[in-house]
Amino acid sequence: MALNATEGGDHIGSYRTYFFIWAALMLLLVATIVVAKVEVSKYSVLLNLFIATVKAGLVLFFFMHLKYENWFLKGVLFMVLVMLASVIGLTFSDVWYR
Amino acid sequence: MESTASECESFYHEKGKYKGILSWLMSTDHKRIGIQYLVALLTFFSVGVMLGLLIRLSLIAPGTFIGQETYNRVFSVHGIIMIFLFIIPGVPVAFGNFFLPIMIGARDVAFPRLNRFTWWTYLAGATLVALSLFAAGGAPDTGWTFYAPYSIRAKANITLAVTGVFVLGFSSILTGINFVTTIHRLRAPGMTWFKLPLFVWTLYATGWVQLLATPVLAITLVFIILGRVFGVGFFDPSKGGDPILYEHLFWTYSHPAVYIMVLPAMGIISEVIPVFARKKIFGYKAVALSAIGIASVGYFVWGHHMFTSGMSDTARIIFSFITFLVAVPSGIKIFNWVSTLYKGSIVGSAPIYFALTFIFLFSIGGLTGLIIGSLEPNLQLHGTYFIVAHFHYVMFGGAGFAILTALHYWFPKMFGRMYPERPAKIGWFILFIGFNVLYFSMFILGYEGMPRRYFDYPARYFPLHLVSTIGSWILAAGLAIIAGNLLRALFKGPKAPADPWGGRTLEWTIPSPPPAENFVETPVIRD
Amino acid sequence: MVQAEKQRDRIGAKYGMWLFLFTEILFFGGMFLLYSVYRSKYPVEFHASAAEENLLLGSINTAVLLTSSLFIAVAISAVKKGNYRLSVILQGATILMGIVFLGIKAVEWFEKIARGIYPNSPVLDKMSMGEILFFGLYYVMTGIHGLHVLIGVCVIAFMVYFTLTGNITRENFSKIENTGLYWHFVDIVWIYLFPLFYLIT
Ligand SMILES: [Cu+2]
């Protein structure tokens, strides 16, 4: 698995992109507060977590350059998240049915 | 290649900035770090054995030798030392450090200074644990599992001990990061994934388990510390907390921890069996990938430690089912080792004796694991000596014997000297007998209902307790012979050749003991 | 050859950092597990307690941390482009943002403590179980997160020093790149803590 040297680390994020990502994050911050305050429905909790995940994704993929990394890091990150979700899920198989 | 290599000096003579003990403590050489870890591990192992003998001694005449409170502390400390200071770091830090870089044709691990840092943190953690034994509050009496809410209220030095284990966990995580990165980045040219020695494969899987499981233990221990120091009641029912949740978190780490101990042990066996059977390993890819399989399925079976905790029936059934799945990749390994031996021309040297014993004892441990992995028998046996026996067959019969295998297999490479075979085999025989007398009687005791962790018991359990304790003495004698033999060889043994066993992996292509940078020229692996 | 080894080391260093972040995910994961279990057990109390949090301060802090992430990201690009002056300024700004974040956090904590709400306090222990757990989780999760911010601030201070002394250059930027990864991760944790403690009312 000889990796060539021109992956992720060499990527130089442009100031412009970073600025736009920041602007998007700020917009999402406003959106999440609005969703919480308006309390449109009982789904606002889920919606808030969804917005948080979008924000986290933006940070991950652009600020942290995950977009430019190889399959290995992306795959492992995905695996770790699945793992954490499964652990929480399995715990709930106890908590909910006890 | 060999002639040129033997001209350079071994890593023992390497001259660095520092002299004396500092030349070891400050060294970033993976081999020096590995040797230091080995010394520390074996020291703690001896302490743990002493405590184990004391437990057994107390059990043939409860109250004569030590009191009840002391008994609780002794079995707790026996567990804490054996688990957190000996067998969890065990194979990776000692043999992994020494051989992983050599086996993949590298000069060191990916982060040598981080490696040294893990050694220091290990020492720091060990110091904290040792302090907890002697500081004012008294040694921990919670068992090695630190179950809440007792661990949050107990008067003993739990905070110190738990902080120590936290630090040890940090060391373990960093070792995992280091090894995984090393295997990804530093393989010699031509060393493709499916040419990696099987020991490296298991270290790789182990590294991932260390990485992904240990942080869960870390946060759990933080909760205990916060509970004791600040009164945060996450596991305190009077504050709405749920003690069973502690068990969930604890075993989410501690079951995978079993694989931190056993996977690299299996790797050692996979190295030794083909060398002494004079055959290639049967089903290389299956053995390699089964390590990954065990590691990933093993992450989701922790609930089998909690069948009697009051967990929901749904969870009990799910966890019992997943537990059975782990048996599949473990079975694959056993079958492949046996198939490798089949029709091999087996050389009867000391390492293979220990390796075969591993297979035998680990199979007993694994199969009894299936018994207690199923719900119904578990409810009967969970609180009994059956668990103690199963545990020791897996831990000592598995990981412990693998460490003995590795010691006898790699001793010539690590120390450059040979040991005499006969005493090694005599020691092995006595140890084997003692082991089974000691622990098999526990299976029967447990089956008859003897509860574990108890200080005293009804008279009808006495005969088997006596047998078991006698077994502990035999076992100790065997260990003493083995240790004496190797210690003597360390100073008096004849010089070891580069490849005394006919091994095929890279460590046997360089002199014994290896030179400071392992390889004069980076090896290139061809088919 | 030497050049090639260096290259390899840099990617290795980045892998090492990512692996460390994976362990951090599971470290915080343990806390999120507790949060989700107790929230599912005491939904009403969690609901009511979250309404007591100071949404304004929480929102300002989120903005502060997101902006700090922008600063460190640009600071790293600046190093890679050889613009060390700009990088040092932005690293300094990141540190400042980190300190502001911790300051606001401290104000929130002290405001609560002044009302007698802290773990094991007589006031809190008289409240309902759900509230005890909510505020316990609040202190522990924001506390451990704050500790990560504090560590990050200290590490970035070292990076400023390294950039000034020429230890970090456009050829050798592993250190600051990894610091950035860590800082962004701490940011992501906050992105989740914010709705869990301030918005779910
Ligand atoms: Cu288990």
Image: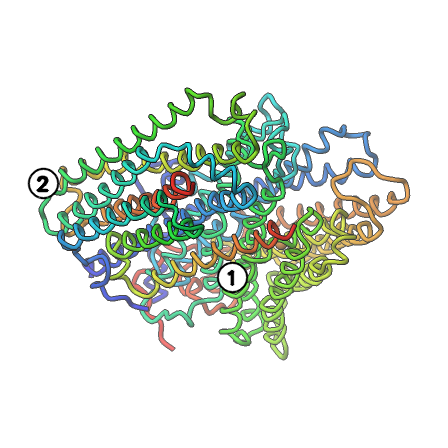
The relative height of residue B130 versus residue B437 in the rendered view (above or below) is: above
Residue B308 versus residue B417: which sits nearer the camera? B308
Q: How many marks?
A: 2
Residue B487 in view, yes or no? no
Left or right: B472 as drawn, with respect to B162: right
Q: Residues within 10 Å of mark 1 (few under 14, many from 20)?
A: some
Colouring: rainbow
x then y, percent, for residue C168: 17, 44
| B101 left or right of B166 in image | left
Identify whether B382 is placed above or below B237: below
Residue bearing the label numbered 2: C85
> Is there CB contact under 8 Å for labels 2 and 1?
no
Q: Chain of mark 1?
A: B
**Could you classify mark 2 by the number of other residues whose Cα lies within 10 Å: few (under 14), some (14-19), or many (20 or more)?**
some
Ligand 1 within 8 Å of disc 2? The answer is no
Query: Mark 2: which amino acid?
Result: Arg
Q: Which mark is residue B296?
A: 1
Vertical placement of B338 versus B246: above or below?
A: below
Residue at image coords 63%, 35%? B237
CA–CA distance in space, label 2 to label 1: 47 Å
- The three-letter code of the residue at mark 1 reads Ser
Q: Nearer the viewer, residue B372 or C47?
A: C47
Residue B411 in percent (x, y) is at: 52, 55
